[in-house]
Image: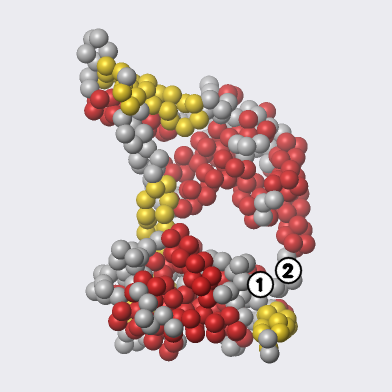
């Protein structure tokens, strides 16, 4: 018996000259390993048959004969695969999030192991209540769980696989419960953003990197650029120099870059993807004089600055991705001396939105500039109370009330 590298499985050379291959492909819903076995004329033939069998199993549609045996988790997974089989239905990152919701908020709970046809409205309501009480999840994550379950049942009903959607009778009640919970958990307009003093600390630190490595300087400049433009980190990672029009002081944002599971591979792996920007909010934005100067400096110090080269590169001068960029940003914050609760790139986006608001920009203009909806901007991005530092003392300064936002 011989094991192949890279998780290709175990091969047994039979007396007949044929080869039998065994491979673990995930875990069954009772917790045991899912083992697939194929027989071929050679190891290569086995690999080909194994890949075909896995693809066939994953693509197998539900039927009226096996629907009664499916658990709620399996129903949701079948619906999930249906989404993936329809080209463009789910982007790679969205697919990862949906699978994570199924694995973590459904499969790990008793309701996930109940037969889907036996799940009642009360079971759904009890499960959501358990997530609220015990899971420590955000309200938005619990909403996604409800949406995944409800969507799976709606799909099964539309396909004729099942006759009843247990979510229907409790959907409004649960949504009202989550909405009230969200209001109680809200911070009444307090959105965490960088204070003016913290922005000054960042700018001073970036100016002091003049003798540092190119990668370190690019990282610092990119942080300053995000404060000025409010771009998402994935949008920044996807930008190429041809997207920046140096003459008109504009930059075109129409792509985002992310890392997601490679669902076409026979072994578990991840790959980098470039897709349209989130919610299809492609846009061309005017750059402030500071943003223009930052880009000019980035282009001047980077080794790759041809039209098709990426604006942000890693230490190997290859395009980076938001995951690595996020880790680098946290290290940067630590070097600047910012508090440990300041993490990630999203606070830079919120800071930009808040600064635009207090400079007098209309809500609709802020939303268009950041590539989002006005509702999301006012709810999640604009800080109505802002921490500022004055003479070494931290003060909470109340700014314009939310009702004044147009």
When asked about the image quadrant of residue 184, the answer is bottom right
Which element carries disc 2, helix, strand or loop? loop
Residue labelled with disc 2: 187
- Residue at x 68%, y 86% (from the top left corner): 392
When asked about the image quadrant of residue 359, the answer is bottom right
Pinpoint residue 123: horizontal percent, then vertical percent: 73, 36
Is 58 left or right of 400, judged from the image as shown? left
Q: In this view, does 12 lie above or below 3?
A: above
Is 177 left or right of 355, judged from the image as shown? right
Can the viewer see residue 384 in this picture?
yes
Is 346 left or right of 225, judged from the image as shown? right
- Tag 2–tag 1 contact (CB < 8 Å): yes
Pinpoint residue 155: horizontal percent, then vertical percent: 55, 40
Pinpoint residue 241: horizontal percent, then vertical percent: 30, 75
When asked about the image quadrant of residue 14, the answer is top left
- Residue at x 38%, y 82% (from the top left corner): 210
The quarter of the rendered structure image containing the C terminus is: bottom right
Residue labelled with disc 1: 191
């Amino acid at each position: 018996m011989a094991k192949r590298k890279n998780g290709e499985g175990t091969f047994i050379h039979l007396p007949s000259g044929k080869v039998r291959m065994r491979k673990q492909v995930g875990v069954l819903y009772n917790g045991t390993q899912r083992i697939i076995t194929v027989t071929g004329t050679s190891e290569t033939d086995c690999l080909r048959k194994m890949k075909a069998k896995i693809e066939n199993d994953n693509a197998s549609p539900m039927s009226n004969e096996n629907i009664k045996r499916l658990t709620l988790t399996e129903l949701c997974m079948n619906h999930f695969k249906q989404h993936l089989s329809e080209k463009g239905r789910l982007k790679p990152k969205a697919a990862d999030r949906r699978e994570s919701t199924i694995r973590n908020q459904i499969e790990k709970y008793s309701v996930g192991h109940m037969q889907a046809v036996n799940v009642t409205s009360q079971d759904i309501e009890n499960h959501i209540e358990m997530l609220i009480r015990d899971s420590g999840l955000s309200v938005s994550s619990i909403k996604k769980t409800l949406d995944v379950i409800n969507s799976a049942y709606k799909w099964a009903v539309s396909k004729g696989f099942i006759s009843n959607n247990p979510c229907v009778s409790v959907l409004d009640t649960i949504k009202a419960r989550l909405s009230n919970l969200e209001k109680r958990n809200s911070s009444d307009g307090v959105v965490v953003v960088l204070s003016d003093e913290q922005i000054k600390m960042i700018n001073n630190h970036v100016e002091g990197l003049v003798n540092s490595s190119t990668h370190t300087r690019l990282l610092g400049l990119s942080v300053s650029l995000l404060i000025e433009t409010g771009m998402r980190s994935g949008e920044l990672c996807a930008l190429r120099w041809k997207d920046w029009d140096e003459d008109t002081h504009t930059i075109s944002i129409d792509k985002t870059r992310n890392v997601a599971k490679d669902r076409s591979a026979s072994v578990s792996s991840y790959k980098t993807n470039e897709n349209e920007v989130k919610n299809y909010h492609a846009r061309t934005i005017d750059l402030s004089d500071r943003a223009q100067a930052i880009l000019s400096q980035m282009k001047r110090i980077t080794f790759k600055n041809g039209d098709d080269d990426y604006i942000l590169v890693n230490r190997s001068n290859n395009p980076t991705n938001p995951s690595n960029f996020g880790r680098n940003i946290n290290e940067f914050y630590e070097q600047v001396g910012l508090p440990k609760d300041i993490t990630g790139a999203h606070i830079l986006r919120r800071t930009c939105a808040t600064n635009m608001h207090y400079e007098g920009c209309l809500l609709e203009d802020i939303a268009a500039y950041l590539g989002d909806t006005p509702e999301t901007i006012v709810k999640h991005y604009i800080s109505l109370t802002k921490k500022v530092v004055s003479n070494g003392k931290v003060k909470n300064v109340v700014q314009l009330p939310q009702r004044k936002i147009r």
